[in-house]
Image (cartoon, grey):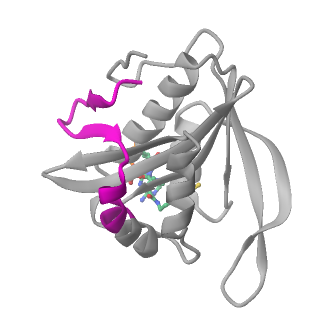
Amino acid sequence: MNAVVTTPDVAELRRMREHDLPEVLTIERSAYYFPWTASVFRDCMRVGYGCWVLVADGRVRGYLVMSVVAGEGHVLNICVDPECHGQGYGRTLLGAALDHAARLGAATVFLEVRPSNRRAVELYMQNGFCEVGMRPQYYPVQGGRREDALILARDLGCGAGGFGYTTSS
Ligand SMILES: CC(C)(COP(=O)(O)OP(=O)(O)OC[C@H]1O[C@@H](n2cnc3c(N)ncnc32)[C@H](O)[C@@H]1OP(=O)(O)O)[C@@H](O)C(=O)NCCC(=O)NCCS
């Protein structure tokens, strides 16, 4: 994917950089009970995972982290500022993930999600993901309990795209 992609709502999708981390971490901590740390994001950037931020009005509004290895894409983190939910940013980020994976030759994109995360499950199902498995007791839950993870996959088949914009490698 190019370093910069312009999406239909005029938000900018570009590679995540070190200087984005303060804003990324603010969103991460407001979105998750068990947020990633700065060092996790740094490691993902260092090893060359696909790390992007979605910027609108000069502020980071969301981000995506994914790996593409051996023909498989894995969405590791996709997150939108809670103040900006419902504006299409999540769909834009997921479209970027599918596009990036397709351009790197992936046949399938996988991700894991908490069944209780209805907003995310709905987003994935609306965008062609299907349930392919479950990891019992995978996620920590407040209070020391655990929650299963749904494993979802989307076959890229004849290619991703159709998310309202194109990217080039
Ligand atoms: C999941 C998440 C990325 C969605 O981002 P978003 O920008 O709000 O989503 P969008 O505005 O692009 O909406 C896309 C779809 O998500 C679903 N969705 C969004 N808000 C929803 C809500 N309140 N209830 C149910 N589904 C919802 C719908 O399917 C929606 O499509 P529609 O508008 O055609 O109905 C966002 O809620 C988020 O960052 N959550 C916290 C982090 C997280 O849980 N990430 C996923 C980890 S697996």
Q: Is residue 110 above or below residue 71?
A: below
Image quadrant occupied by the N terminus: top left
Spot occupied by residue 65 in the image (x, y as percentages of width and height): 52, 46
- Residue appearing at x 59%, y 30% in the figure: 128
Nearer the observer, 164 or 22: 22
List the single residue furthest toward the front.
46
List the single residue furthest toward the top.
158
- Which image quarter: residue 157? top right
Image quadrant occupied by the C terminus: top left
- Residue appearing at x 78%, y 83% in the figure: 145
Residue 120 relative to residue 130: left or right: left
How many marks the image carries: the answer is 0
Spot occupied by residue 119 in the image (x, y as percentages of width and height): 50, 56
Q: Is residue 67 above or below residue 163?
A: below
Nearer the observer, 118 or 60: 60
List the single residue furthest toward the right.
136
Nearer the observer, 164 or 79: 79
Q: Is residue 106 above or below residue 85?
A: above
Q: Is residue 7 above or below residue 118?
A: above
Spot occupied by residue 9 in the image (x, y as percentages of width and height): 20, 36
- Which image quarter: residue 82? bottom left
The answer to if 73 sits in the magenta stretch is no
List the single residue furthest toward the left.
57
Residue 128 relative to residue 9: left or right: right
- Residue 85 seen by the camera: no
Residue 136 relative to residue 144: left or right: right
Spot occupied by residue 25 in the image (x, y as percentages of width and height): 40, 68
Question: Which segment is the magenta one?
Answer: 1-24
- Residue appearing at x 45%, y 56% in the figure: 79
